[in-house]
Image: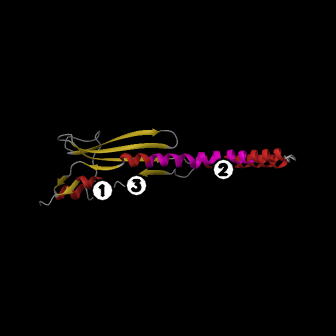
Amino acid sequence: MSGIYLLALIAIWLFVGWIIYRLWRRWKPTALNRKILYIALGALLFSVWFGGPYWEVAGKKVYWDAQVRELCNKDGGVQIYETVELPADQFNRYVSRNWVLPDKSQATSSDDYFYEREVFYFHKDDPQVTRRLTRIIRRSDGKVLGESIRYGRGGGDLPGFWHGSNYTCPNSVSGFESSIFVKSDNK
């Protein structure tokens, strides 16, 4: 249903733009200073009428993507504080098959390691801009073994039936768990 509203909005926007253009073309000043005003007014109307939707669609995304890049350059990425050697059976069971660590709230007393996540919202409106901090923690002493910090922007597109765009950095934090948990040489 939102696709119909979007098409109607675009049609109305184009129709009003056409009316503004027709009115502008009808006004034919004769004096030079009036012609200059006529051209300047036309350029201003064109800029506002087409610049506003550009800012609404692309400008906000460009601005927030630049903010995300800047934040990411400051402290985004992976920090490993300690590596842990796992016996081959545990390493093969977890790391080789996309490690499944429990969240802190779902971890049981038998889980030696768990992760905790913090999400901070820089901008909650559309587009949404977040900082996601993931920590892997050892239960026995509460030590943080590593941290992964990612920044991202989601949304900021025209409303419609399509999926919204996003931008995250660093682009890849793959290998976070496998950088902390290594296979033991002991059999």
Q: CA distance from mark 1 to mark 3?
A: 12 Å
**Precedes in sequence: disc 3 or disc 2:** 2
Inspect the image, locate mark 1, and give the three-letter code of the amino acid beneath it. Answer: Gly
- In this rendering, which labeled residue sits more in front, label 3 or label 2? 3
Is 168 inside the magenta-drawn segment? no
Element marked by disc 2: helix
Q: Which residue is mark 2?
A: 7
Residue 1 can be seen in this image? no
Q: CA distance from mark 3 to mark 2?
A: 34 Å
Q: What's the mark number on residue 80?
A: none
Residues tagged 1 and 3 counted as in contact (Cβ below 8 A): no
Inspect the image, locate mark 3, and give the three-letter code of the amino acid beneath it. Answer: Asn
Q: What's the mark number on residue 171?
A: 3
**The one of 115 and 33 positioned closer to us in this rendering:** 33
- Farthest residue, direction right: 30
**Precedes in sequence: disc 1 or disc 2:** 2
Q: Is residue 132 left or right of residue 179?
A: right
Magenta stretch bounds: 42-69
Q: Which residue is mark 1?
A: 175
**Residue for point 22% across, 53% down:** 181
Element marked by disc 3: loop
Residue 152 image point, x, y percent: 43, 47
Inspect the image, locate mark 2, and give the three-letter code of the amino acid beneath it. Answer: Leu
Residue 23 image point, x, y percent: 81, 46
**Residue for point 72% across, 45% down:** 45
Q: Could you say which quadrant of the image residue 103 lies in?
A: top left
Residues tagged 3 and 2 counted as in contact (Cβ below 8 A): no
Query: What secondary structure is the magenta-colored segment mainly?
Result: helix
Residue 4 image point, x, y percent: 64, 48
**Residue for point 17% across, 59% down:** 88
